Amino acid sequence: MTPWRSRRRWKSNTSHWIEPIDLAAVIGAFHNDRMSRTYPVGIVGEASYQTAIRSCAVGQRVRIVHEPDNPYDEFALAVATEDGRTLGYIARDSWLQDAVHEEGKGCEAIIKEISAARRGRLGVVLDVSPSDHGIDTRAFSRVPVENERSPSGCLASLFGL
């Protein structure tokens, strides 16, 4: 096959052929790669939602939803399970707040880690992947703080707990 009938081009300063580049595919791949990256994000307020957190697992998909009528923060982003149980909130100073509220981005999230914190309470870290679709909203619902069991038994009485 002669070079002028091929889609390949001869590179004059070397002795090999150059394959044509599909620029749209390269840009699309870059965009998809950028959008498929995940970033760890810790949540706050987990102490009030321990029962819901205990029923979750690492790798479980969760939703980030905006609660515009939240009396504590009109920009509140709640972290909820697929069936709507709240696990906590995205911190007010998180980069994710800016991405959602100022740039109009959405996100997908899974639970990256569930770990024990102080006094046996569980903490949650998410893997968040930004996306171009918007974010859902839901009405704020006041959930009472779960009752904390006080320690009991001989060690508790020995240490005055």
Image (cartoon, rainbow, N blue to C red):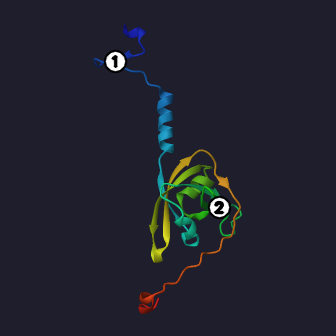
Return the x and y of residue 106 as percentages of the image width and height: 60, 50
Element type where label 1 sits in the image: strand
**Residue name at image x 69 percent, y 64 percent:** 140
Q: Nearer the viewer, residue 69 or 58?
A: 58
Q: Could you classify mark 1 by the number of other residues whose Cα lies within 10 Å: few (under 14), some (14-19), or many (20 or more)?
A: few
Q: What's the distance in space between the residues labelled 2 and 1, CA to CA?
A: 56 Å
Residue 25: percent from the left, percent from the top? Answer: 49, 30
Q: Quadrant of residue 65?
A: bottom right
Q: Residue at x 49, y 67 (%)?
A: 123
Q: Quadrant of residue 86?
A: bottom right
Looking at marks 2 and 1 on the same chain, the residue that comes earlier in the sequence is marked by 1
Q: Is residue 145 left or right of residue 22?
A: right
**Is residue 127 something one can see in this rendering?**
yes
Q: Which residue is mark 2?
A: 75
The answer to whether residue 45 of the structure is visible from this angle is no
- 52 above or below 145? above
In the structure shown, which secondary structural element does the residue marked by tag 2 occupy? loop
Residue lying farthest front?
153
From the viewer's perspective, is residue 113 above or below residue 1? below
Residue 95 in percent (x, y) is at 53, 57
Q: Quadrant of the N terminus?
A: top left
The answer to which of 118 and 157 lies nearer the viewer is 157
Which amino acid is tagged 2?
A: Phe
In the rendered image, residue 98, in percent from the top left (x then y), is placed at 58, 56
Q: Identify the residue under disc 1.
A: 17
Q: What's the amino acid at mark 1?
A: Trp
The residue lying at 59 percent from left, 78 percent from top is 147
| The one of 62 and 20 positioned closer to us in this rendering | 62
Can you tell which mark lies on residue 29? none
Q: Is residue 137 above or below residue 120?
A: above
- Mark 2 is surrounded, within 10 Å at the Cα level, by few (under 14), some (14 to 19) or many (20 or more) other residues, namely some
Figure disc tally: 2
